[in-house]
Amino acid sequence: MEGSLCKICQSPLGSVGIVTLGVKGSAGLSKASKERQDNLTFVTGQVVHSACRQEYCKPQIIAKYLQENSSGVPPLSQQFLI
Ligand SMILES: [Zn+2]
């Protein structure tokens, strides 16, 4: 799987710290993606960083992410300032 990117962080996957998603893993990530409104799809057999998977599925982190997205400055206007 050389040259593949982690779907979560969009960084190249190395040979360490990666995990191949099983049925439960992909279902959990798809659920987290819906909650985050990321529209990412995860399938069985997909490879991601194991640290990314843990972070992505953590309820506390999802809640924080949604909170920042709803109460913060809209991302587009931030980009225009740079
Ligand atoms: Zn990653």
Image (spheres, rainbow, N blue to C red):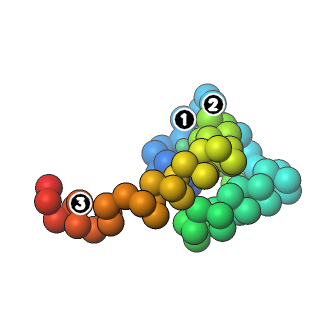
Amino acid type at mark 1:
Gly
Residue 78's label in the rendered image is: 3
**Mark in front: 3 vs 1:** 3
Residue at figure coordinates x 67%, y 40% from the top left: 54
Q: In this view, does 68 lie above or below 31?
A: above
Please provide percent x and percent y for residue 42.
69, 62
The x, y position of residue 32, in whole percent, is 68, 58
From the image, which quarter does the C terminus lie in?
A: bottom left
Quick check: 21 left or right of 64? right
Q: Quadrant of ligand 1?
A: top right
Residue neighbourhood size for the residue with mark 3, other residues' Cα within 10 Å, grouped as few (<14), some (14–19), many (≥20): few
- Residue depicted at 65% across the width and 64% down the height: 35
Q: What kind of residue is marked 2?
A: Gly
* Quarter occupied by residue 71: bottom left
72 left or right, relative to 12: left
* Mark 3 residue element: helix
Where is residue 45? Give x, y as percent. Answer: 76, 54
- Quote the CA–CA distance across marks 3 and 2: 33 Å
Q: Are marks 1 and 2 in contact (CB under 8 Å)?
A: yes
Residue highlighted by disc 1: 14
Give the quarter of the image for residue 33: bottom right
Query: Which residue is located at x 23 percent, y 60 percent?
Result: 78
Check the image and name the residue furthest to the left. Answer: 81
Is residue 5 at least partly visible in the picture?
A: no
Q: Sequence-wise, which precedes: disc 3 or disc 1?
A: 1
Disc 2: which residue: 17
- Give the farthest residue toward the right: 23
